[in-house]
Amino acid sequence: MAKNHCCFFLLFFFLMASSIEAQEKEPVETLDVLVATTGLGSLTSDSDATSEFSVDANNYIFIQQVGPQNRVFVDIKTDQSELNFTQQGTNNTIVLGVTALKADVSVNQYGSNHIYREYLNNSNAVIQRNFTQNGNGQKLEIYNSNSISEKMILNMSGQAKTIVIRNFN
């Protein structure tokens, strides 16, 4: 009888230990997170997630994703940056490739199949962006920056609309 209690206790202990271990590893399995010291970061979510990354005291990335297949890819080189991304829906994508002095970017995607891409290579640029995509299938692409677009606010709504902005100095 004591042998059965001992076996039961050991079985119970191992089951609890593996259950606790699985709970500790769950965020790593449901979120594919890569933040490298080079400033390259990406987040892909198959579930709801909120993440905050800080490479140093002057550079922050805040990401909130609700829904499956939302993706954020960031390659940013700045002295100071604050990036805020919200994705609520399915299959939304944010791609940001920026080299600038300072970047303050806020992107909100509500709905499905939105794409936001921005590419800038100007180490003296200071950009401030606030974009909202509401509906389905909105696509926004921005290349470079100038004085007209450096403090841009843009709201897109509806279905399957595309805006491409090419800035020249």
Image (cartoon, rainbow, N blue to C red):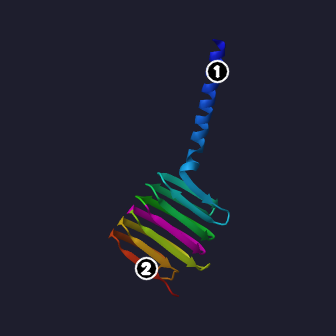
Percent across and percent down for residue 166 are: 47, 83
Quarter of the figure that contains the N terminus: top right
Percent across and percent down for residue 93 are: 47, 65
Q: CA distance from mark 1 to mark 2?
A: 67 Å
- Identity of the amino acid at label 2? Val
| Quarter assignment of residue 112 | bottom left
Confirm whether residue 75 shows in the render.
yes
- Residue 106 covered by magenta stretch: yes
- The kind of secondary structure the magenta stretch mainly shows is strand
Q: Report the span colored magenta.
A: 91-111
Percent across and percent down for residue 113 are: 40, 65
Residue under the image location 59 percent in, 69 percent down:
75
Task: Give the camera-side residue of 110 and 151.
Answer: 110
Q: Do the residues bearing badges 1 and 2 touch, measured as CB atoms within 8 Å?
A: no
Compared with 76, 110 (above or below) is: above
Mark 2 lies on residue: 164
Residue under the image location 40 percent in, 72 percent down:
154
- Identity of the amino acid at label 1? Cys
Question: Which residue is at the far left?
Answer: 158
Mark 1 lies on residue: 7
